[in-house]
Image (spheres, helix red, strand yellow):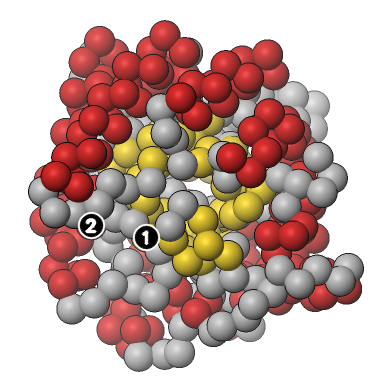
Amino acid sequence: MLYDLLRPLLFQLDPETAHELALQGLSAWQAWLQRLPATATRHDPLLASDLFGLHFPNPLGLAAGFDKNGALPHVWAALGFGFAELGTVTALAQAGNPRPRLFRLPAEQALINRLGFNNHGAAAVAAALAPRLADGRPPVPLGINLGKSKLTPLADATADYVASLRALAPLADFIVVNVSSPNTPGLRELQSEAELAPLLAALQAENALLARDGGAPRPLLVKLAPDLADDALPGLVALARAHGIAGLVATNTTIDRGVLPAGHALAGEAGGLSGAPLRVRATAVTRRLYQLAGRALPIVGVGGIASGADAYARIRAGAALLQTYTGFVYGGPGFAPRVVGELRALLARDGFANVADAVGIDA
């Protein structure tokens, strides 16, 4: 209710300024939030699942892009999320693209961003995150999303990703390899099988060193673009399975403006479109990936999830886990408990004993 009152004021501000204020507010309250019972961790056999060696108390996670530098690892469980993905983090610190670079589309419940992986760099993020986790990890899994530094030539992308993995994997429960953002020039070329195969091989080789050093390899997931042609998906699924990838994140933001009303005032803004207009395509990609891989490659469904009904439809299409960013921006701090509660009611209505039983039944 408080957020409903404050949102009109926040939405008078530039979107990125409002985002920075939200981060500052959550940071100031992080210690207090840690003392609250984390709603995401209350045992509910209907909502909990175990995937790639991790326990998820509910399937709704925070998507990458909100907590880019891992400043708030203890906040997300207290706000009702079942997991969180920090980042995107790059090997080199970078300021991102010039402002303005984030735009609201309230009528469409959407955002356009061309932030450009603004972050402090892998070494600095690791140095700041380690002490935040030293006294205890949050009660939900934490992933870290890795991207390519803008200044790194595409030919050197593998070394760039490996450096980030080396710095951050010890702090993460899982790692997401982001090769699908539209806001780093050339990045999406890494989704081709010829480019992706050596990248995944190198990352898994580095990942294996964690076990040699007394740790454990981290589950690696790959985040794909919604704008991939359908005929590219079988090869990518086969490649992921060949390299021991733990799962797929479907999908990143879209550059397609055909999903907006004709003549939309912001259609000409460059960047990735997220939120409700992405829902249909993201669901279609999820369904196709599930048809190709079944449960061998768990899918994290993201794009346009703003309600329990959206979440339920994505699960039935094949998503084992879910993520949100834009829905959280519009919905505020009460968003995750509301969506999870609505999802629970739908699962119970249809007689499911566990959320996993509903995965892919419409695919």
Of helix, strand and loop, which one carries label 2? helix
Relative image position of residue 190 (x, y in whole percent):
41, 18
Q: Nearer the viewer, residue 226 or 217?
A: 217
Task: Give left or right: position of 362 versus 219.
Answer: right
Quadrant of the frame with the C terminus = top right
Marking on residue 142:
1
Quadrant of the frame with the N terminus = bottom right
- The answer to which quarter of the image holds residue 261 is top right
| Residue that appears at 50% across and 79% down | 41
Task: Give left or right: position of 296 versus 309.
Answer: left
- The answer to which quarter of the image holds residue 220 is top left
Relative image position of residue 133 (x, y in whole percent):
21, 70
Which sits earlier in the primary sequence, circle 1 or circle 2?
1
Relative image position of residue 65 (x, y in whole percent):
42, 48
Q: Which amino acid, by three-letter code, is at mark 1?
A: Leu
The answer to whether the residue labelled 1 contacts the one labelled 2, judged by CB atoms less than 8 Å apart, is yes
| Residue that appears at 26% across and 25% down | 202
Mark 2 residue crowding within 10 angstroms, few (<14) / some (14–19) / many (20+): some
Position of 155 relative to 340 (above/below): above
Q: Which amino acid, by three-letter code, is at mark 2?
A: Leu
Residue 138 visible somewhere in the drawing: yes
